[in-house]
Image (spheres, rainbow, N blue to C red):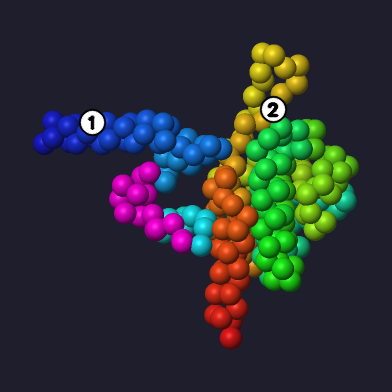
Amino acid sequence: MLSAVRVVSLLLLLVLGGVWAYAWATRAPGEGVAEAFAGRIGRLFGAEMPVPSAGGVQLAQGVSLGGPFNLTDHTGRAVTERDFAGRWMLVYFGFTYCPDVCPTELGTMAAALDAMGPAGEAVVPVLITVDPERDGPAQLADYVSRFHPRLVGLTGTPEQVADAARRYRVYYAKARRSEMTDYLVDHSGFTYLVGPDSRVRTPFRPGTSPEAMAAAVSAQLANRSAATR
């Protein structure tokens, strides 16, 4: 009996190791290894739902992202998730010194909201920095103004930012390049559609088109409206 348990345990470790290696090799740009691993495990055991045709990724059953946070907005005002209660949000974790991915994804978010027309006014675009040491309110205020007039920048202490990132399962870490005197921040690159209850409804992969994002957000808003009638 003991040897059988050992054999089963060894096989399980080998399977998990293989899935981890596969997740590392096939993860999407900006997707953390742990994030990719969770998704592959979900698919392996049938827990992940199909990708919605309108765009975005369906959360695996039992997975909950989002929730409470205590941060400071780009005007210097302390805010929590309660300040956004009852409203939809598009949330992106990035930083103002990001050279390429962040501007691209924030531009996509802005274009998606504009494409929605008046309906887009129901959604608050939000950037949460993963570089609180450099991204204070003044830095964020200048940065967010370049993308959308309603874009809200949020920062905080390193501990506050880490707590918010953990609730969204966002990976980030400082990365120093030998040819640079300063640092960058490696981070996962999903955009999150957050419902009025502060919980994530749909994560959008990096590279999602504005049209697909706008269609998926519009569909979620329409479903919510129909459910409350």
Q: Which residue is mark 1?
A: 10
**In this picture, is 128 found above or below 90?**
above
From the image, which quarter does the C terminus lie in? bottom right
In this rendered view, identify the residue nearer to me: 7 or 44. 44
* Cα–Cα gap, marks 2 and 1: 39 Å
- The N terminus appears in which quarter of the rendering? top left
Residue farthest along the left direction in this orientation: 1
Q: Residue 51 lies in magenta, yes or no? A: yes
- For residue 37, side relative to residue 91 (left or right): left
* Residue 155 figure quarter: top right
Answer whether residue 163 is visible to the viewer in this image. no
Query: Residue 40: image x %, image y %?
Result: 38, 44
x and y percentages locating residue 186 in the rendered image: 62, 31
Give me the residue at 72% from left, 68% from top. 117
Residue 83, horizontal then vertical, whole percent: 76, 63
Q: Is residue 50 visible from the viewing direction of this image?
A: yes
Is mark 2 in CB contact (under 8 Å) with mark 1?
Answer: no
Residue at 47 percent of width and 58 percent of height:
58
Identify the residue position indicated by label 2 in the image.
184
Which region of the structure is painted magenta? 40-53
Would residue 84 appear left or right of 78 to someone viewing this image?
left
SS for dot 2: strand
